[in-house]
Image: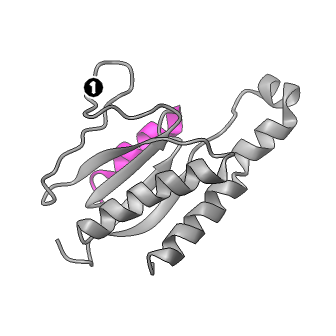
Amino acid sequence: MSMSMSAMCVIGCDGYLGQFIAREGEGTYARVYAMGRRRARERDHDDGEGDYYAHDDDPTTTTMVRVGGVDVTSHTSCVEAMTRAYDDAMRRGVRIAMVVNCAAVSSPGACERAPDVALAVNAPREAWRATREVARMRGC
């Protein structure tokens, strides 16, 4: 796979919108790195619970890779998740061309009860800071 092949990273893939964005990316990108709140298992399969991410070691096909659980309010968690995605992409000769954030606190009531949490999740400064940091460290 040449470096001209591109990948997409979707943060918030456990949510309604994130699932659709990630699945749509499979038809366009060489790899889709899916990040959500839940931790990845060794191999995830569609069991009706939303664990539809398959980790396939065949780099010739478009594959969705569940990177693992990420807390978008934690810089450390975001750096770890982005590092896993960027390192896998570099190993496979794929360039992460797009990072889409779909993580959100979507319930107005939850936002009103915990506005600081809602702001930290809905405007994830730590996720963007970590993405920039890891991309720069990898020369991307």
Residue 21 rendering spot, x and y as whole percentages: 44, 46
Task: Using the image, determine if residue 2 lies above or below residue 83.
Answer: below
Foreground residue, 133 or 99? Answer: 133
Q: Please tell me in which quadrant of the rendered image residue 132 appears.
A: bottom right
| Residue bounds of the magenta highlight | 15-28
Q: Residue furthest bottom?
A: 139
Q: Main secondary structure of the magenta part?
A: helix
Query: If the image is split into quadrants, where does the N terminus sit?
Result: bottom left
Task: Using the image, determine if residue 97 lies above or below residue 56.
Answer: below
The amino acid beneath tag 1 is Asp
Residue at 46%, 44% in the rendered image: 35
Residue 75 rendering spot, x and y as whole percentages: 65, 53
Residue at 73%, 27% in the rendered image: 107
Q: Is residue 5 magenta?
A: no
Relative to residue 95, is residue 124 drawn left or right? right
Residue at 26%, 78% in the rendered image: 3
Q: Residues within 10 Å of mark 1 (few under 14, many from 20)?
A: few
Q: Is residue 18 magenta?
A: yes
Q: Is residue 108 visible?
A: yes
Q: Is residue 6 visible?
A: no
Residue that mark 1 sits on: 46
Q: How many marks?
A: 1
Residue at 65%, 39% in the rendered image: 104
Residue 83 rendering spot, x and y as whole percentages: 45, 60
Relative to residue 73, is residue 93 drawn left or right? left
Mark 1 element type:
loop
Residue 76 rendering spot, x and y as whole percentages: 61, 52
Task: Using the image, determine if residue 135 lies above or below residue 77.
Answer: below
